[in-house]
Image: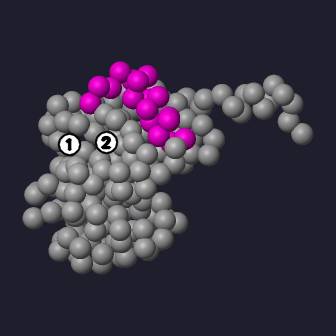
Amino acid sequence: MLSKTELNKLRQDIIVQSDMREIYLSLHSTWGIFSPREIDEGTELLLKYIDIQKTDDCLDLGCGYGPIGLTLAKLAPQGHITLIDKDFVAIQYSQKNIKLNNITNAEALLSNGFDQIRNRQFNIIVSNIPAKVGNEMLSLFLHDASQQLKAGGRFYIVTINGLRDYMKRNFKEVFGNYKKCKQGKNYTVAMASKD
């Protein structure tokens, strides 16, 4: 059985230092959020291949504690970054990390998929899609993303390699195009664009 001291230590924030794309962030996390102790391999790979302009409005779909969205906020200082997640703890930590890193062009909102942001349009949507989200939710993500991208907008995803062919078929069905940006040992980064 854990002592009171050990339990209190488990309740303390976990601090993750991030330096992706030469953007340095100090991110707070906690147990129960995806990859709480370090930036995961898929997120690192995804961020290397996102083509972003300083004025882009971006959406981080399934943001967790915010490593992707906050990095994009620094890369697009004249744009606006929206981070969404269905987990209220993830949103609390994203909001905390926005403040701790003095980021003024980002906000984190509780939303199941696109439900709470239907009136917004984006240049870029990004997601580190969980392997266990299910085909139905993946279909909703793709169709909703196509509706909420501006003309010429891009949807970047990273998935485990086992979902690569599934995502390729579905990107082609929904967007009419698919580009594999990078396939690593365990993950694939892909992109589709809206005409």
Magenta-drawn stretch contains 177: no
Asked which quadrant contains residue 89, the reply is top right
The residue under label 2 is which amino acid type? Thr
120 vs 160, left or right, is left
Question: How far apart are the two marked residues, 1 and 2, measured between alpha carbons?
Answer: 8 Å
Other-residue count near label 2 (Cα within 10 Å), few / some / many at <14 / 14–19 / ≥20: many
* Colour scheme: one colour
Q: Is residue 90 magenta?
A: yes
The residue at which mark 1 appears reads as 57
Residue 86 horizontal/vertical position (percent): 47, 51
The numbered dot on residue 28 is: none
Figure quadrant of residue 80: top left
Q: Give the residues in magenta.
A: 89-105
Mark 1 or mark 2: whose residue is earlier in sequence:
1
Q: Quadrant of the N terminus?
A: top right
For the C terminus, give its image quadrant.
bottom left
The reply to whether residue 105 is in sight is yes
Residue at (19, 51) in percent of width and height = 121
Horizontal side of residue 145 vs 28, given as left or right:
left
Q: Residues within 10 Å of mark 1 (few under 14, many from 20)?
A: many
Q: Position of residue 99 (x, y in %)?
A: 41, 24
Q: Name the residue rendered at 14%, 54% in the picture.
A: 150
Outermost residue toward the right?
Answer: 1
Question: For residue 187, which quarter of the picture?
Answer: bottom left
Q: Is residue 59 above or below residue 149?
A: above
By secondary structure, the bulk of the magenta-drawn segment is best described as helix
Residue type highlighted by circle 1: Asp
Label 1 with label 2: CB-CB less than 8 Å: yes
- The circle on residue 82 is 2
- Residue at horizontal 22 percent and vertical 49 percent from the top: 120
